[in-house]
Image (cartoon, rainbow, N blue to C red):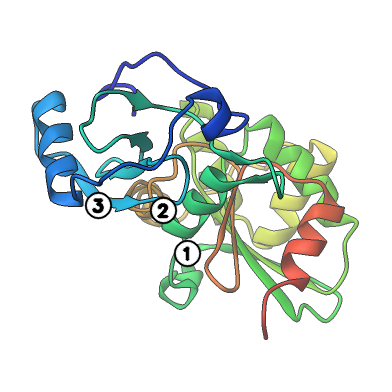
Amino acid sequence: MQALLKPVRVKLLSVSIALGLTSTAHGGEDEVRKAMEAFIGAPAVESVSQTPYGGLYEVVLKNGQLVYTDEKASFIVDGSVIDTATRRDVTRARLNQLSAIDFSTLPLDQAVKVVKGKGTRVIATFEDPNCGYCKRLGKEIDAMDDITVYTFLYPILSEDSTQKSNNIWCAKDQGKAWTAWVVDGKVPAKATCDTSVITRNVELGQSLRISGTPTIFLADGSRIGGYVPAAELEKAMDSVKR
């Protein structure tokens, strides 16, 4: 993200207040695209759309970054737009929308499956065994009920992460080995089998632009980036239409 752009970061409390912008005649999305790509020096823009906030244009780059500019691309805002009337983080909501996936396309046979209770509520996670927040999430999920979790082992932190992932995947009871590690800290026993699935998981995660763990996908394909406590995850799952 920062490799393409290095603007001064501006955190907005209210676009209209912080920037003092008002609606003007709009130069058009094509013109904004051309100006942004001229500034970047590469055809890096995925999409451009006008927002209802202070004459800003939303610019989505091909690397997943979302920034804002005006009709002439005379400035770039790299930060969150907060709607002061609703206190809603407009940028975060938009990023979640842009990063949503078709849940049905996930190769669930490449994931460690854990079922709690009836397991009617389903999520998928991408997790590194040595990720501290993944362990916190694991403890939260262990205390939940009526949930099925498909965990894609996604070792991106270290070689040890890969070794632990291999051992968990090759365990006789994968779910038990994963839970014992993230909840109780029991190191997975050494085991051997075909671990090419771990490589495929990393390739899959990269194709989904997953740069950190844990990353959670709800059954409707919406994405939650990072650790969330059980109460927040429960609320998110219950909001999914079945």
Disc 1 and disc 2: Cα gap in Å?
7 Å
Q: Identify the residue under disc 3.
A: 47
Vertical comparison of 4 with 105: above or below? above
Which structural element holds mark 2?
helix
Q: Earlier in the sequence, mark 1 or mark 2?
A: 1
* 231 or 144: nearer the viewer: 231
Q: Earlier in the sequence, mark 2 or mark 3?
A: 3
What's the residue type where badge 3 is placed? Answer: Ser
Q: Are marks 1 and 2 in contact (CB under 8 Å)?
A: yes
Residue 10 rendering spot, x and y as whole percentages: 49, 20
Q: Identify the residue under disc 2.
A: 201
Which structural element holds mark 1?
helix
Toward which corner of the image does residue 234 lie, by quadrant?
A: bottom right
Toward which corner of the image does residue 33 lie, by quadrant?
A: top left
Residue 81 rendering spot, x and y as whole percentages: 54, 37
Q: Earlier in the sequence, mark 3 or mark 1?
A: 3
Q: Are marks 2 and 3 in contact (CB under 8 Å)?
A: no
In the image: residue 87, left or right of residue 77? right
